[in-house]
Image: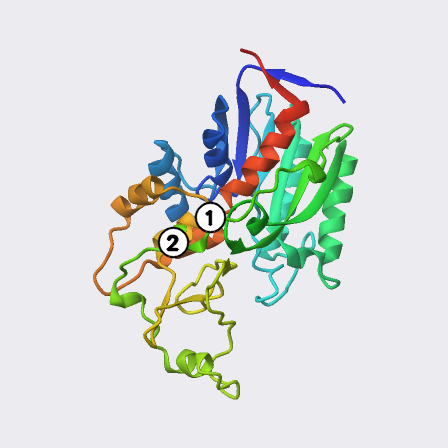
Amino acid sequence: MEVIIIKILKIVELFGGIGAVRKAIINLQIPYKVIDYVEIDKNCVKSYNKLYQENYQPKSVIDYELPNEKIDILMHGSPCQDFSRVGLQKGGEKGSGTRSSLLFETIRIIEHAKHKPKWVIWENVKGVLDKNMRAAFFYYLAEMNRLGYETKYQLLNAKDFGIPQNRERIFAISYLGENNFDFNHLEKKEKKAINEFLEVDCSDKYIVKQASMLKYIQDDKSNKKFKGRLNIVQEFCYTISTKQMRIPNAGIVDLKNGKYRYLTERECFRLMGFSDNDFNKLREIYPEKENKTSSILYKQAGNSIVVDVLEVILKEIFKNKIQLLE
């Protein structure tokens, strides 16, 4: 496998969200240049611009074409809603019209590119491997193979890489040519204590008050009004979702006084690998309101990718496959 010698890492972010891969590259102190960023959610674009001092506008991957430049890494975290086990499980087969089928826009984009990216990284929920939805995923692998890519994939859990969040996601790492990427070489880290991520004093607006949830917590399993999953955060939280207040999949915090609270927006960002400085920047554009939480910030955290997992993936890519000129 050839070693790519570069002066600066050139990346493209499709379905770019709030730029988790860019954050990982910054944390690793890798010289980089974003060739393009594509995201249709106007609030995500607003947050991305604030975090990285950019001036992008919302745009869709549909009909998008890559710039005529060489690209080292293309990152695409396409929509997961139709693959998710907690959703309607419509799947993402090509031509189905579901949001998750936008995955195949990436295939079109690469196929039309004058310069195909050397590496392509895709992340999504583990539901893509379920029996009723895996056809779309394996078709994606076949299409990448047709375009000259060899792909390695594996389920990775954030809590194996230092973050106390039980978040399993599939990562597919494709290389244009023979792919020597080895998931077994990823640097595992003992998860940090959950208390390092939790705030000490929180507003009463985070207190659990929904009657159906309280009955469920009190072991009334016959309670049929609450349909979600409700765990008490202990050594780690569970998967942070986009609607943390209404469907607190990540779990709730026991205040030890007969009361429980939801995770705060800041805690969710910490548990996705973003710093308090990052969150403070976003608070400037989404100011805290006295009796109301931010559905926008919860959604952006839940839809993002854990930065720490991307860091170890990039380290493995760089270890033997990409070298930077001094």
For this orientation, the residue located farthest to the left is 290
Q: Which residue is mark 2?
A: 267
Point 44% across, 55% down: residue: 194
Q: Which mark is residue 38?
A: none
State the residue in front, 291 or 189. 189
Relative placement, left or right, of 147 versus 169 is right
Residue at point 57%, 22% (across, down): 68
Residue sitting nearer the eye, 209 or 44: 209
Q: Residue furthest top?
A: 326
Q: CA distance from mark 1 to mark 2?
A: 9 Å
The residue singled out by tag 1 in the image is 272
Q: In the displayed structure, does residue 211 sit left or right of residue 61? A: left
Q: Residue at x 57, y 12 (%)?
A: 325
Q: Are marks 1 and 2 in contact (CB under 8 Å)?
A: no
Q: Quadrant of residue 253?
A: bottom left
Total tally of numbered discs in the picture? 2
Q: Nearer the viewer, residue 164 or 317?
A: 164
Q: Residue at x 43, y 84 (%)?
A: 215
Image quadrant for the N terminus? Answer: top right
The residue type indicated by label 2 comes to Glu
Residue 63 visible, this angle? no
Task: Where is residue 154? Give x, y as percent.
Answer: 70, 47
